[in-house]
Amino acid sequence: MDRVRTFPYLRQDFAASLVVFLVALPLCVGVAVASGVPAELGLVTGIVGGIVTGLMRGSSLQVSGPAAGLTVLVFEAVQSFGLPALGVIVLTTGLLQVGMGALRLGRWFRAISISVVEGMLAGIGLVLIAGQLYAAAGVDAPVSGTGKVTGIPGLLVDAVSSPAALTSLALGACTIALVVGWSRMPKRVRAVPGALAAVVLATLATLAFDLPVETVRVQGLLDAVQVPALSEFGGLATLSLLGTIAAFTLIASAESLFSAAAVDRLHDGPRTQYDKELMAQGTGNTVCGILGALPMTAVIVRSSANVQAGARTRASRVLHGVWLLLFAALLPSALALIPLPALAGILIHAGWKLIPLRSLVPLWREHRGEALILVVTAVAIVTINMFEGVLIGLALSVAKAAWDASHIKLEVVDSSPDGVRARLSGNATFLRLPKILDSLEALPDDRPVSLDLSGLHHLDHACRTALENWAERHSSSGTEPVRLTRDDVVTTAT
């Protein structure tokens, strides 16, 4: 009875934790392999995300771990600075996140344009899909994002003439088909997550038919963990490493807090405390950095599975971390049986889900500027790199905001021999002053003019002075002075 009172939702949280564990397991391994690090490090990040971050306050039902959204960035960092430097990058990222949370900056990440975030995720998805096609074929991928995309036709041509590559690609394609089709299975069958079922079936097929495909390389959990040496911190003096840390911090924080907002819409429990959630993510990344593991973010796939499975408290995500720890400790050799094409298929599906295809067409119809920001951000990430692509997206977003803030429209409501009634709407700032004056000068000066300013959201001092000066000199001799009206106040030029 005392246990029931202390943990009133233990049954629901226990069942949900098993579901989240089954969803997280293949993704932790797949993200690690795609990031170019030992598979065990993905499990380490999942364990820390469950046990450490899971115990902290912020978002009660959000689940953290290694995310597909950071795969491209981690791979580039490992290629540029080496695996030992990854711990320094993640550790510093975590400390920055903790500091930003303590300074109550978490809420400001919600101010980032959703088009920039979606463009970032779309770019990551495109690079992830392109890169994992090579992994599915069992060949090395080009380093650059552009090289990955342009090399796909040659990859497919070469695969046709190679039985081993063709077999590997077929296994990856079957994995994708299973994940996509799993949602149409009977409800009882769908109790097992589609990604896990696809990986298990692909593993059984590889063993049964002795398929010539590569499998995950295993070196042991403790051997994979590498505490960063003091000498690695010397890289913090280089601008390139600091830029990478800034990219990690920005992207991991934005993805986590946007995920938190999405998870809040899935349940009616306590709302996310954004500053505390940012500190929780930072604490988890600090621990991951000390262990030399992958960075973590909140992951919407695991979080939504947690909510849908009936979780009620933080206990579900903590328990999912415990199950990952037990698996890594008791069954590490099972990882060596997993075929790499199956993991590539899982990540290709994950990358596809990062691309907002359904929302792009309506966005283009209603807000073309936002759609353009999304597309340009995604293309920049593919053709240049992650950090600069995000900076380009942010710069475009700021430029668009400045343009929108200065948008103004002059509408002639009524024009007759007895007078002209016109209306200004929008934001009258000095940025648009030439356009405003050009439009006003075009109004006839031989008839009385009444200019309604009530549609203006903002009227700065420069524009107010310019309007008053125009009103004084506009009317010709013998014509009534211009009348300026705003909020029922009439000003007559003299």
Image (cartoon, rainbow, N blue to C red):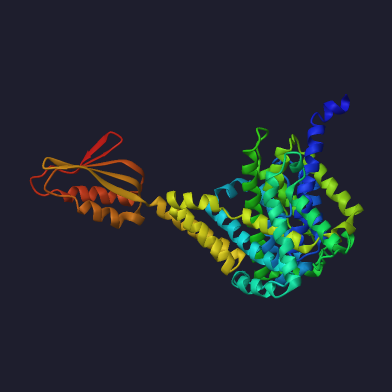
Say which quarter of the image contains residue 185: top right
Q: Is residue 355 above or below residue 110?
A: below
Residue drawn at the location 44% of the way across and 54% of the way down: 368
Q: From where the camera sits, is residue 29 visible?
A: yes
Q: Looking at the image, which residue sits at the far top?
A: 1
Query: Residue 37: x, y in percent?
Result: 78, 65
Q: Looking at the image, which residue sits at the far left?
A: 478
Depth order, front residue of 373/98: 373
Residue drawn at the location 51% of the way across and 53% of the way down: 360
Query: Residue 434: x, y in percent?
Result: 29, 57
Q: Quadrant of the N terminus?
A: top right
Q: Is 358 placed left or right of 346 in the picture?
A: left
Q: Is 245 placed left or right of 314 in the picture?
A: left
Query: Residue 247: x, y in percent?
Result: 64, 61
Residue drawn at the location 83% of the way across and 57% of the way down: 204
Q: Quadrant of the C terminus?
A: top left
Query: Residue 230: x, y in percent?
Result: 81, 67
Depth order, front residue of 490/29: 29
Q: From where the camera sits, is residue 346 visible?
A: no
Say which quarter of the image contains residue 311: top right
